[in-house]
C-alpha cells in the first residue's frame, strides 16, 4: 500500500483580537474547496471539549498547547491538514509543535495591542479593564512574538483576503499543498516522531476516537 502523504499543520499565533480565528477559518475554507482533508482545531473549542478543567496558568497553557500539538501531529500523520488558532504565549509552546509536526507552518497574526483592544470580539480586554480577569496575554502575561515565522501578517494593514492568500501562497511555496491543477508528487518518507510524553495506551485510545470520527 502506498504511503499516505502527511498533512500540513498551520499554527496561527497572536494576541486576542488580532484576527487569528477569522483568517484560520478562511484558510480552512480554501483547503476544503480544493477537496483536501482539513480540520480546524480552534483553541477555545478544543479547550472547552477536551480540557474543560484546565485553567489559564502557564502550566495549564503548557498542557493545553501540548494536547493541541499532539492531536495535530496525529491527524497530520493520516493526511489531514490541521489549522490551529491559539495564542500559545511562549515560543516554547510553538517550538514544541514544530518539533512534533513534520510540515509545520507558524503564522504570526500581528496587530498592535491598541487595535486588538478596540476590536475586542470576546470582550476580554473590557473584562480586564474592569479587573474581572488577570491573565490576559499582552497585558498581564508577556506574549513572546515569533522570531522567524513562515508567515507574518499585519492585520492592521492587510485585508482578510490578503492574509488568507499569503498563507495559501506559503503552503504552495513550501510544497505542503499543491496548487489547484498541479499533480501530487511521491509522498516523502516518514520521519521518526519525537517523544511526546504520552503512553502507547493513550495513543491507541485517541486513534480509536479519531477512527470513529472518520479521520483515520
Image (spheres, helix red, strand yellow):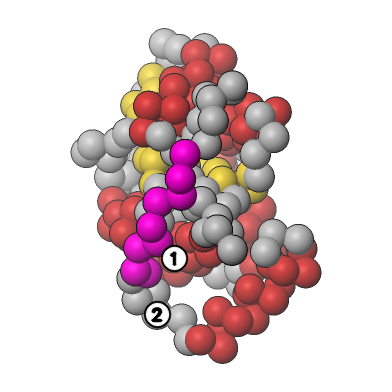
Q: Quadrant of the N terminus?
A: bottom right
Compared with residue 80, is residue 169 higher up or lower down, i.e. above or below? above
Question: Residue 31's spot in the image, x, y percent?
Answer: 62, 33
User: Which corner quadrant of the image does residue 58 belong to?
Assistant: bottom left
Q: Nearer the viewer, residue 124 or 46?
A: 46
Contact between labelled residues 1 and 2, with CB atoms less than 8 Å apart: yes
**Residue 19 in magenta stretch:** no
Q: In what element is the residue under mark 2?
A: loop
Answer whether residue 215 is visible to the viewer in this image. yes
Magenta stretch, residue numbers = 185-193
Instruction: Classify residue 214 as left or right of residue 202.
Output: right
Give the dominant element type of the magenta stretch: helix, strand or loop. Answer: loop
Q: What's the mark number on residue 66?
A: 1
> Measured along the vertical axis of the image, is residue 46 above or below residue 128?
below
User: Which quadrant of the figure has residue 108?
Assistant: top left
Residue 215 position, x and y percent, is: 69, 59
Residue at the outermost left position: 147
Please, is residue 158 above or below residue 5 in the view? above
Estimate how packed mark 1 is, as few (under 14), some (14 to 19) or many (20 or more) residues with alpha carbons within 10 Å.
Answer: some
Q: Quadrant of residue 213?
A: bottom right
Residue corresponding to mark 2:
197
Amino acid at each position: 500500500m502506498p504511503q499516505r502523504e502527511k498533512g500540513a499543520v498551520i499554527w496561527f499565533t497572536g494576541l486576542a483580537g488580532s484576527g487569528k480565528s477569522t483568517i484560520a477559518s478562511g484558510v480552512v475554507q480554501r483547503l476544503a474547496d480544493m477537496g483536501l482533508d482539513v480540520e480546524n482545531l480552534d483553541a477555545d473549542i478544543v479547550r472547552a471539549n477536551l480540557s474543560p478543567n484546565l485553567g489559564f496558568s502557564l502550566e495549564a497553557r503548557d498542557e493545553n498547547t501540548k494536547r493541541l500539538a499532539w492531536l495535530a501531529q496525529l491527524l497530520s500523520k493520516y493526511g489531514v491538514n490541521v489549522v490551529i488558532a491559539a495564542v500559545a504565549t511562549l515560543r516554547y509552546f510553538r517550538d514544541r509543535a514544530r518539533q512534533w509536526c513534520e510540515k509545520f507552518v507558524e503564522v504570526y497574526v500581528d496587530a498592535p495591542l491598541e487595535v486588538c483592544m478596540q476590536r475586542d470580539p470576546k470582550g476580554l480586554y473590557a473584562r480586564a479593564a474592569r479587573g474581572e480577569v488577570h491573565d490576559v496575554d499582552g497585558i498581564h502575561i508577556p506574549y513572546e512574538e515569533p522570531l522567524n515565522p513562515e508567515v507574518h501578517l499585519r492585520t492592521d494593514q492587510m485585508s482578510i483576503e490578503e492574509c488568507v492568500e499569503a498563507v495559501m501562497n506559503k503552503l504552495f511555496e513550501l510544497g505542503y499543498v499543491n496548487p489547484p491543477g498541479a499533480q501530487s508528487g511521491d509522498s516523502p518518507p516518514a520521519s521518526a516522531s519525537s517523544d511526546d510524553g504520552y503512553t502507547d495506551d493513550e495513543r491507541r485510545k485517541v486513534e480509536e476516537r479519531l477512527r470513529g470520527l472518520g479521520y483515520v
